[in-house]
Amino acid sequence: MVAGLLFLAFAFFAVGQASATRNGAQGAADSAALAAAQRARILLGPKLMAALTSPNGLDDVFKDEGAFVDAAHAKGVSFAAKNHSDVTNWKPEAGDRQYSFTFWVKTQYSVGSSVIPGTEQDHGTAHATAVIKLRCDLPPSGGTGSGSQPEPPPVTITCDGKDLPIVPMPDLEKIFTVKLVD
């Protein structure tokens, strides 16, 4: 009976080891995806300011993605490594005024030896998706009225229902939202 209880105790310990390894993988995937989206937000700030001067410019913020996607990927890989995991796959994807980054990771460490045979070489795996989304629109432009040309008002953007002047540039957190979605 004591041997049976001892075996059960070791089996529960093995389940705990596997769970801890899986949680480590999920933490690495989450941090990789969030780091990528936050890096993209930093790089998209100046691009957004330039887009405000062109018609439908806000719709083009996430186009021509090369530079910010490559930098976002590098940041995600770096954060996975800081969490002792390797990126096994990743997928950047453009959407309607948003961009998502999905990372699949595998832990660099295994579950370890236990009373359950075959677990020594098992690694934790997980995936996560983070989205960066534009919160803003341009306010409707008003007519100039009479023939005289008044001083144009300062350019503002409307973010979450609030008008924000763009000079000085508002905090990027007010312009873009970053969150985990998967």
Image (tube, grey):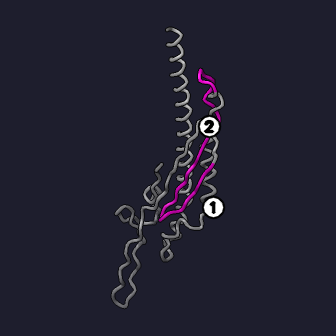
Image location (x, y in percent) of residue 101? 55, 54
At horizontal 54% and vertical 64% (from top left) the residue drawn is 46
Residue sitting at x 58%, y 40%: 125
Q: State the residue in front, 76 or 100.
A: 100
The dot on residue 107 is: 2
Nearer to the camera, 26 or 147: 26
Q: Position of residue 98 (x, y in %)?
A: 49, 61
Q: Secondary structure at mark 1?
A: helix
Residue 135 is one of the magenta-drawn residues: no
Q: Is residue 11 above or below residue 81?
A: above
Q: What's drawn in magenta, residue-wise?
A: 89-117
Mark 2 residue crowding within 10 angstroms, few (<14) / some (14–19) / many (20+): many
Residue type at mark 1 is Ala
Q: Is residue 92 left or right of residue 52?
A: right
Q: Earlier in the sequence, mark 2 or mark 1?
A: 1
Total marks in image:
2
Q: Residue at x 46, y 50 (%)?
A: 181
Q: Position of residue 175 (x, y in %)?
A: 45, 60
Residue 95 relative to residue 154: left or right: right
Q: Amino acid at mark 2?
A: Thr
Q: Give the Cα distance between marks 2 and 1.
A: 28 Å
Residue 67 disc label: 1
Which quadrant of the structure image shows residue 150?
A: bottom left
